[in-house]
Image (cartoon, rainbow, N blue to C red):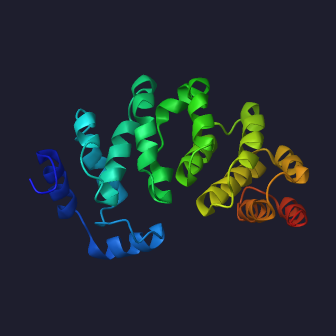
Amino acid sequence: MMNGTPLYEELLKELKANAESDYAAFHKRLLKNDNINVLGVRVPTLRKIAKKYSARIDELLGVPDDYYEITFIKLQVVAQLPLEEFITYVDKCVSLIDNWATCDCFSAKCIAKHREEFLPFVYKFLRGGEFAQRYALTVLLSFYMEERYLGLIFTSVPDTDTSLYYVHMAAAWLIAEVLVKFYDNGVEFLNDGVMDKKTHNKAIQKACESYRLTKEQKDFLRGLKR
């Protein structure tokens, strides 16, 4: 086979059969990374295809990441594993992430029942590259948005490199959600002034876009912009 294993050829054939050229062009613009090859297969279809490979993880992880959709499927398969197996693959998976969409869709439900056990990985990825940091922040957003973890969130955000665009946006998104769910705590965090000006203001902007805050709360937040 020219490009790898029979599994690779089988997978690529199915992906191409479900590809839409218009959607590929649209999605590639959203990814903002010209180095990524996009076939144009929609997410629901990718998730259906991923289920077929749940028993072939090691073989699947060995195929080339020539296309966005192949990497997406790899991460979807791994994300369905129980924690004990998931953590054996998570480093490899995070190293494959090179765009916001793959990152944000890599959501392992097993973390919800094993938050404490997964914390060492959160800490490790917070010290990684741009998309490792973004992954850690999105994990905090998805699985640690509880009052008992606010201290973790508030210490994690200032430690990330928000000069990196996708880290900046994830940090702002995370703090905006804190403001929506734990308004007083979020305001106190903003008043501490530990975020850079750009991320501070973006978090306020994103919070004010929510329908879950009152007009009075939004007006007050706008007054905290720097």
Residue 213, percent from left and from top: 78, 57
- In this picture, is 196 found above or below 141? below
The quarter of the displayed image where residue 114 is located: top right
Is residue 211 or residue 49 the one in the foreground?
49
- In this picture, is 153 found above or below 84? below
Q: How many marks?
A: 0
Residue at figure coordinates x 42%, y 31% from the top left: 86
Residue at figure coordinates x 33%, y 45% from the top left: 74
Is residue 53 or residue 128 the one in the foreground?
128
Residue at figure coordinates x 34%, y 51% from the top left: 71
Residue 122, percent from left and from top: 60, 36
- In this picture, is 181 found above or below 226? above
Residue 155, percent from left and from top: 76, 40
The quarter of the displayed image where residue 65 is located: bottom left
Q: Is residue 216 left or right of residue 135?
A: right
Q: Check the image and name the residue furthest to the left.
A: 1
Residue 214, percent from left and from top: 82, 59
The quadrant in which the C terminus is found is bottom right
Q: Is residue 29 left or right of residue 62?
A: right
Residue at figure coordinates x 48%, y 35% from the top left: 109
Q: Is residue 79 left or right of residue 158?
A: left
